[in-house]
Image (spheres, rainbow, N blue to C red):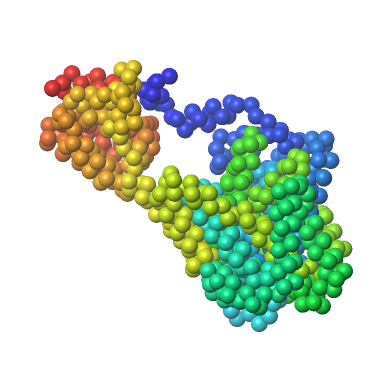
Amino acid sequence: MTSEALGSPGWNPVAYRFVEEDCASTSDKVGVVSRTVPSDEATSTSGFRRYVPLLDWLPRYDRGFLTRDVLAGLTVWALVVPESMAYASIAGVPVQYGLYAVPLALLGYVVFGACRQLFVGPSATVASISAVAVAAASTSATNQSQFIALTAALALMVGVIYILLGLARMGFVARFFAKPVLDGFIIGLGLYIAVGQFPKLVGIPKPSGDTVQIFVDTLRDIGDWQGLTVLIGVLSLAALFGLARFAPKAPGALIVVVLAILAVGAFDLEGEGVSVVGTVPTGFDFVSWSGITWGQIWDLVPGALAVVIVGFAQSVAIAKAYGAKGGYRIDASQEMIGYGAANLGAGALQGFTVTGSLSKSAAAEEAGGKSPILLVVTSAFVVLTILFLAGLFKNLPEATLAAVVIHAVSGMIDFSKLAHLWRVHRDEFVLALGALLGVIVIGILAGVLIGVLLSLGLLIRRLDRPHASILGRGRDGTTFVDVATHGGAAEVPGVLIYRFEAPLIFANAEVFVDGVLAAVEQAEPQPKAVILDFAAVSDIDSTGDTELQELMRMLDQRGVQLVLARATGTTRELMRVDGVIAAAGGERVFPTVRAAVDAVAPASQP
């Protein structure tokens, strides 16, 4: 099939792709029958079941997978317990509140989440945003209990925002946080978290200032480092990385935490000056909500939006990757509802905000997990830990907790992504670096704002400076290709074929006209006809229509005929309604580039 055939009237490349995918037979490989839907924002399920995916997959659950799901749930539990306690220290709350964030969050996502392999729970990413947001809102807080209550309130607020956005079918917003910017932000956030744990790793108070200042001041205070604390921290880090390298399936964090607790008890390390977590209540130890003011709630809004922006962009990317691997599509808006339910669950038990986790999702898959049932198992065992085992963590060294955090975020600090952008896309490298520096020099919330602005800037730049190309006949003499990238292509004498590869809208309409006129002036010999290949123009607004008619008038004054080819159904209809087609006349509109060339080439021969 030639490119001209694909550009024939009535052919819609987007619709064709979805139809082709809908006809494919897929199996999701997770213990239930897959259901493919035509797009991210569509679903074949109607009514109440549409918003509760549990009702779709649970009745078809293969009970033969129960044993695997239970074992996978236990594996994830072994990771979740120590890491959730470590992330609680990032969020600025006592370690037990990291456990509180897990049970109902998992169950909420099981019921309402769209991805069957994603783990949603405590995360270093959103825990750090939570800490900054609550600190900004709690300047008038009088005690830690109020900070804890505000942290839980933030989780509840995030849950409400997620659900409202999901019900409004706003899942598409994830596409507006550019991946290079997100990569830079995540690297910066990883550095922010790791450096923030550095003082705890060496046993000194955390210096004030930004990430760079904290790092420099911690090194400067090397004389105050606590020897035994440094030893415990270094050994904990070495053990974590060693287990990950040589025994990747072992619950490394749990093993290291247990060994550190035993060492503190056996050698009375607390008496030697090693800081430990201290008393961890067994059972749920809730604080009062009464101290929160409406002013503080309002102050949490920027932080809640930051959590939603970053958490959703990161989580839905993981969910879509697993969906593609499993052979089913992810409804991004339904994912929002799932994340909302998870955060409401976390906040209800006074935990902190949660999001999707790649590491624990991967661990569940490697352990043989086949469905969200494994999250139910994990939830149950975390509840048992809270009720009966929490007190055992009182001798956990703070340095080991810091080591768990640093190891957990080490995967976020991937400079190879920046190196790739530097080699291939220098402009995107600058954006990624800007987001990274925004986090470590200014702060997390500022970094989120910078990331959003940079993403919008990239979008505007791409719209303002879209790709355009001059076409010529291909080697076969029947197709038309970009002469700049196809060495054998030859331009048609007396005819300029110009392809514009973007929506023709207010942001780039003048650029489009200037580009066509510049191409006409630079052409040798001067063309007597210009063919606009509109196959890649997916939309046109009133400004684009006006500029197109003005271009037609200017070329007519120069004695150059302007004709249109391959306008898609939507664009062609918009041009018809706005009068462009009538202004052009039927003799200037063609279904293919070849038909346009055949119509104008004889009259334009030099």
For the point 53% across and 69% down, the residue is 212
Nearer to me, 397 or 285: 397
Give the left or right position of residue 604, taking residue 447 as reference.
left
Query: Is the residue 468 above or below the residue 463 in the image?
Result: above
Q: Is residue 155 at all visible to an observer of this figure?
A: no
Residue 420 at what x, y percent from top left?
Answer: 48, 46
Query: Is the residue 326 above or below the residue 71 in the image?
Result: above
Q: Is residue 195 at all visible to an observer of this figure?
A: yes
Residue 397 at what x, y percent from top left?
Answer: 76, 69
Nearer to me, 123 or 245: 245
Quadrant of the drawing holding the C terminus: top left
Give the left or right position of residue 157, taking residue 461 as reference.
right
Query: Is the residue 370 above or below the residue 526 in the image?
Result: below
The image quadrant of residue 149 is bottom right
For the point 12% across and 31% down, the residue is 559
Give the left or right position of residue 16, taking residue 90 as reference.
left
The image quadrant of residue 497 is top left
For the point 36% across and 50% down, the residue is 461
For the point 68% across and 52% down, the residue is 120
Quadrant of the drawing holding the N terminus: top left
The number of discs equals 0
Residue 514 at what x, y percent from top left?
Answer: 22, 43
Nearer to me, 184 or 400: 400
The image quadrant of residue 502 is top left
Residue 331 at what x, y percent from top left?
Answer: 59, 43
